[in-house]
Amino acid sequence: MAYQEVTTTGYGTRVGNSFKAVGGGFILFCLATAFLWWNEGRAIKTEKMLDEAGSAYVEMENPSKRDASLEGELICGTAIATTEDSLSDAQFGIGAKAIALRRTVEYYQWVEHSESKSEDKLGGKEERTTTYTYSKEWTKRPVESADFKDPAYQKKNFVLTTVNETEQYAENVSWGAYKLNESLIRSISSHENLNQPISEDLLKQLNKDAKTAYERFYGAKSLPVDTAKQQPADSVMTDMEYIHQNGNVLYYGRVPGSPEVGDVRVTFEIVTPAKVTVMAVVDGDTFKPYRAKNGKRFQTLVMGKKSGDEIIEYQKDTNNALLWMFRIVGILLVIASLKGIFGFLETILKVVPFVANIFGWGVGLVCTIVGVVWSLIIIAIAWLFYRPLLGIGLLAIAAFLIWVFAFGGKNKIKELRR
């Protein structure tokens, strides 16, 4: 059942808070403007670097043999990434010869969700109603339920155990006759399940500890007769009541198919040898990033066999997607900052909510138009700085918008149509 909390803020407090928001709005405006400028410079520099790399790389035909003539060259080649290093999870006593070993953890917990609605009252007060709902979910970390708003759900969470997530990588990963550096190693994504049984003695100890934690919170309970039917067919040590291993999953809880609050799920994965394509600068028996004339660095590893042109094209598409995503974020931040600066005007009129809403709509529209125009000007100036021709075009668009919305351009357009 939902739990509601109603708070009322007086008119004087609201006006005071709105004036305080002016300073924050100015700071956000400056940061958003700087973010837009940085994004344009980042995108242009990255594109120039990729163009330079695209014309500089050479295909490495046979990575299985070291070629002295390729020393210091940006190469693109495909080979099997493999290792002889053995990695182990000391806590659970399992391991394998692998490029990487990962342990991920999930906790079954009550999670609090909130949704707020505000209503302006005559006289300038604001009444805010916050509705809290609760659901059981798998989370990445234990949830502190003592801070829940609904007393009925406070202190409802606990965990049978806490386990840290870990990730370790092999130090020596070969790629043909070469070795991969740490950054390239971390880019390999050939994940597989680590289906290795944990020792019986350790499982018994884990089961004992989990049982103690369970009974401390829930009290002693006997497992239902039909529980065995719910156990996975290939699970390990199915006679244990509070610990179960099924393939690469270690489950703390009574019934894996019917989780209870406090259950914990630990998953083990490894990264196995795989065919990968590397694009980097040859540095002896290993690799280092390519450094473009503008100082930008570049190296990459992709799964499977790819040509250099395919990699460069993909990187350009990614760069362009980031450019537009950051542009949209920057523009929205500029608009939000302007609303923060001028929001006090609407708040002052909240004595009569109907009038304030109409005025607020107008302020929002003006802030949106000004924010878009300002953002276009910043983007255009940045392009003027980095690429003059495109910058002039963007400035022309911004000037047209200013003419339309600020200097009666709409009327002149109507006259021309007539």
Image (spheres, rainbow, N blue to C red):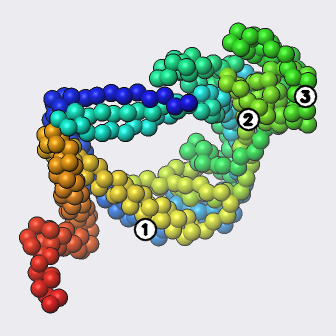
Depth check, front residue: 232 or 219: 219
Q: Which badge, 3 or 2, is on the more N-terminal residue?
A: 3
In the image, what residue type sits under mark 2? Phe
| Disc sitting over residue 51 in the figure | 1
Q: Which badge, 1 or 2, is on the more N-terminal residue?
A: 1
In this rendering, the answer to whether 398 lies above or below 332 is below
Depth check, front residue: 313 or 138: 138
Dot 1 alpha-carbon crowd within 10 angstroms: few under 14, some 14 to 19, many 20 or more? some
Q: Which badge, 3 or 1, is on the more N-terminal residue?
A: 1
- Residue closest to the far left: 407
For label 3, the SS is loop
Q: Which residue is mark 3?
A: 226
Q: Position of residue 417 (x, y in %)?
A: 17, 88
Quadrant, the N terminus:
top right
Depth check, front residue: 366 or 118: 118
Residues under labels 3 and 1: Cα distance? 65 Å
Say which of marks 1 and 2 sits in front: 2
In this rendering, the answer to whether 269 lies above or below 376 is above
